[in-house]
Amino acid sequence: MSIVQNFEVFVPKLIEKREFFSPGHRACQGCGEVVALRLVLKALGENAIISNATGCMEIISSAYPHTAWMHPYIHVAFENTAAVASGVEAALKALRRKGKISDRYVKSVGVAGDGGTADIGLQALSGAVERGHDMIFVCLDNEAYMNTGIQRSSQTPFMASTTTSPAGKVIPGQRTEKKNMPEIMVAHRALYVATACPSYPIDLINKVKKAKNTAGPSYLHILSVCPTGWRSPSNETMKLGRLAVETGIFPLYEVEKGKYRITWEVGKRRPVEDYLKIQGRFRHLTPEHIKQIQEKVDREYELLLNKVKYSKSWA
Amino acid sequence: MRDKAVEKGIYFMNGDHACCEGAIAAGCRFFAGYPITPATEVAERMSIRLPQVGGIYIQMEDEIASMAAILGASWGGVKAMTSTSGPGFSLMMENIGLGVCTETPCVICNVQRAGPSTGLPTNVAQGDMMQARWGSHGHYEIIALSPSSPQEMFDMTILAFNLSEEYRIPVLIMADEVVGHMNERVVIPDIEEIEIVNRAKPHAPPEGYLPYRPGPNGVPILPNCGDGYRIHVTGLTHDERGYPVMTADAQAQMVEHLVNKIVLNREKIIKTTSFYLDDAEVVVISYGITFRSARSAVEQIREAGVRAGLLKLDTVWPFPEELVRSLARNVKALVVAEINLGQMVREVERCAAGRCRVHLVPHHGGAVIRPERIIEGIRAALKRKRNR
């Protein structure tokens, strides 16, 4: 049975036909992150200014003559994406207020990987969301530092093997659990927070559009399959994204002003083994390890369902 | 555990890995780092090697935290290091100053790449030499070494730990991308042949003990946290008790002490290697990977009959002022080759003080300087009439 088949509302007519991320860039074969980025930019349309942290998406897309960006684009350092995007937003606001630029509404958008969001970039992101800038921050999460050669990040899942959390006889890979970035952003009272995955393109595009129409800080956390770092077949990127959602490892949900809502109901969740077994980074796992991961996923999913049930909008 | 710390043998390894082996041989048991090209291999190998010897590797959320963590670990009582490159080195600057001010032994390996900013992440440069000297705010002295091969990465990392323990100061290993990524023969000697220096520990009774009073060589004898002494570590200006004192007098005393413990011991700290200095009419001064090109250039030009000498700076900071001053008196010209547009050459000019010509062979970064360019530089320096 093919995994990609049960779209409920596939309405390609509603999707922007123009491309804002041109082909010919240098992403790896089967890169899920670049698919996510392309969809994000399609959903944003032309009225956006991008601030992009150092990372895979910067390296593969910005070097001449492989430059893929159609938007005004600032490559920043590693730790300051949200701060630069804040500055862009504030400048646009000031110039609009003084009547120096046209009244066109242009969104400031920060794009960073998981390291540039959750590790080195967290301080800047926290400040930007706290100050309430009218901007979108997009985290393209491929669960490790792939650009420097697969080092662990705080988004690397429990027990995944990376070059700095190598799986050995004593220690089975990453020893910490994935830091819950969307929840951190909800705690900052970001107006709109959502998780997405390019395996669900319509869902992703809708969320970006929602974020774009939110006057205030919004945060999108997009799981991006990385065949190079996850040691998975490059032709199964979309399938892996689906499996991450269908196993409940990466549920798709959104939080509007504090109110949680699951945007893609999975019904009966698949066992996590389905997702883990096609990835080399989990190759060392024993059935006991997989059971541990299953228990953690079950617990987290239940917590999420509780939030959906009991959370209330603060608006 | 001890047997795994020094794996005696002859290896073919890259400079980053040799740095790890040197650190572990020197007794380093804590590494905090953050991935950055071209220093990532240091962190990667440390994440495998440290657990094997009972040490701890932690990956931090950024370089600010990495540098801060090794300061904490050092006060906790272990030898600690981190590694990074350009942008990360910039982020570490405040905490390097904290390490200098609190007299915390630790080692930072900067595998330099071309800047400014993100620059050329995968290509070589020697553009951080002045940042190493003056990068953190305030006036202070620092120790920085410059390895030119994987073997020197091993040897100098041990030396760096020994210096940091002896003089209680962060020691910088100013490597570069080529040295870090180049694979060469590395000889790891027997554990008995490696000289290790450990920080002096106080024996005085805790009552009336002044932790920051300079010891016999000008370096205070400080306890680790938990050794039974009352210890107050601060980045504020402090007196011999270690407590903050907000006066100009206390500032003068503390800064004098921080500077003097390095300046007055500089003869013991500074290491240089020289070639053909006896008959030289022109001397090339170089360090790091550029020394390799300079050596080739000097060998070639000597065969052509030019009496050229070569001075390699193993220690770049403190700068070997006396040596360069005396060279300047005895030669026609000093040629400085470095992969920047003139950093260490300023020190050479300052020491030469017009006594001889000083000629720079610069490079913007991104590639090593070819020996031919240094040969041209030597010839140009000898031809040139006036000082630049």
Image (cartoon, coloured by chain):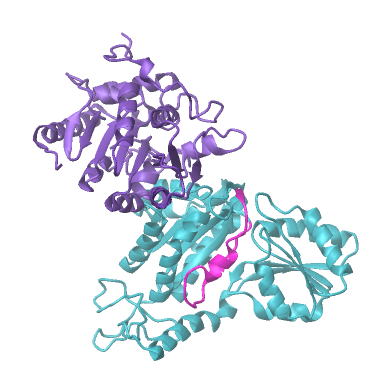
Chain colours: A purple, B cyan
Q: Position of residue B160 (x, y in %)?
A: 51, 66
Q: Observer-nearest residue: B2 or B356?
A: B356
Q: Quadrant of residue B227?
A: bottom left
Residue drawn at (47%, 86%) of the image:
B256
Q: Nearer the viewer, residue B204 or A96?
A: A96
> In this image, A84 relative to B77: left or right?
right
The magenta stretch is B123-148
**In front here: B340 or B198?**
B340
Q: Does residue A159 appear in this view?
A: no
Task: Identify the residue at the far top of this view.
Answer: A1
Counting from the top left corner in percent of width and height, residue B241 is at 31, 85
Residue B124 magenta? yes
Of residue A297 and residue A22, the one placed in the foreground of this image is: A22
Above/below status of B362 relative to B247:
above
- Residue lying farthest left? A310
x, y percent for residue B56 = 34, 53
Whether A192 is drawn above or below B369: the answer is above
- Magenta stretch holds residue A264: no
Is A95 left, or right, of A263 in this rendering? Answer: right
Q: Position of residue A207 (x, y in %)?
A: 30, 30
